Image: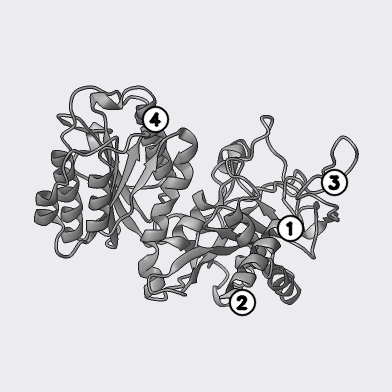
Amino acid sequence: SNYVFSNLVRARFILLIYEYFNAVLINEVDEEGNNVELGGQFILEPNDHFNNLSVNLSLSVVQVPTNMYNKDPDIVNGVYWSEALNKVFVDNFERDPTLIWQYFGSAKGFFRQYPGVKWHPDEHGVIGFDCRNRKWYIQAATSPKDVVILVDVSGSMKGLRLTIARQTVSSILDTLGEDDFFNIIAYNQEIHYVEPCLNGTLVRADRTNKDHFHEHLDKLFAKGIGLLGDALTEAFIILNDFNQTGRGSVCSQAIMLVTDGATEMYDDVFEKYNWPERKVRIFPYLIGRESAFADNLKWMACANKGYFSQISTLADVQENVMRYLHVMSRPKVIDHEHDTVWTEAYVDSALNEKAGPSLMTTVAMPVFSTKNETGILLGVVGTDIPLQELMKLIPKHMLGIHGYAFAITNNGYILTHPDLRLHIAAVDDLYNVAH
């Protein structure tokens, strides 16, 4: 026991003194000219291969979302063990000099990027990037899914609770990818589809549909009483119909419940629609500081293979929403599915005025820890690939003088095509959805 205790103390000491190169803080100094904490001198040199950006080909850097503490023990621990990726990144680049950005997005939120490059906050001192919201991360971390989001708009949800609820729903939408299908239902004493034109169905979670629903969230207002049983029944009917008819993702299914409480356990609804197979997972999000009805929501989650979270403030939203991804990734862990995913084409975030915008795709793969039976999602590794590099692999001599090659994703998006062009006026818009 003394040996175990001494090892734990030593491990904690290592984490306390361990420092890493924070992508925002490198080469920053304080008023006295000293390197700031988590900064330090970091050699950066312009490199033609990376659009003449100043990079470090020997080391990676770590970016932590602005809303997270960059010395949180979980962050520091993950950064510590993932430091071994430096050698892997360097070796990969030496073996294949055509590689560009390589990275690891952690389930804890930090983002390790190679080669090392300095990140710059916006005019408000904020970097909104969170790797877990990126398409490559979402596609690799979870299986395709059908999701119905139920949001409580009864009278008790007025004020701050409704604001937090809107943000929670918005964050859930951000975690959905092109392979997912969804709908949002608001409920009080009646059922209200956020988009009335889409009653009783699910739509693909592409950018257009998600933006449309984001706009409708501001139209939610609270009044009346909440009849959760009717809302759950409606959600199960939709999901069961899609499952039986082979529409939607034809994979995982979930109900996201955003509410300030549940007076019952609604076991009769679950027994009718979800037991014993439990094909639909339930993820309750309890809004507010009160926990009077928390037990009922916790029971719903446990009885339906889901996960319970309580969100008290707007600052709690992001991290609590992300937790459901761990649960949805478990089937992949158990089945050892390390599927490689490819994103649709997007514009390189490192635009170069001389070279012009460059179309890219990302190839990514999930990383799991299998130390226990259920497994844990550690994160996702990925690399960016210019489409022009893919085009070089095409055996043009076999296509004939009038032949050409093209590629589309499983969702029908063009990955590469000889006639695929970017209008310069659209670059700024495309940049916003890069990755």
Front residue of 288/186: it is 288
Answer with mark 2 or mark 1, whichever residue precedes in sequence. Answer: 2
Rendered residue at 79%/63% (across/down): 57
Distance in Å between CA atoms under marks 4 and 1: 46 Å
**Foreground disc of the pair 2, 1:** 2
Front residue of 268/401: it is 268
Q: Which residue is mark 2?
A: 3
Verify CB contact (< 8 Å) between mark 3 and mark 2.
Answer: no
**Foreground disc of the pair 4, 2:** 2
Distance in Å between CA atoms under marks 4 and 2: 57 Å
Answer with mark 3 or mark 1, whichever residue precedes in sequence. Answer: 1
Q: Which residue is mark 1?
A: 17
What mark, if any, has residue 35 been given in the picture?
3
Q: In this rendering, does residue 403 appear at all?
A: yes
Q: Residues within 10 Å of mark 3 (few under 14, many from 20)?
A: some
Distance in Å between CA atoms under marks 3 and 1: 16 Å
**Foreground disc of the pair 4, 1:** 1
Q: How is the image coloured?
A: one colour
Answer with mark 3 or mark 4, whichever residue precedes in sequence. Answer: 3
What mark, if any, has residue 215 been given in the picture?
4
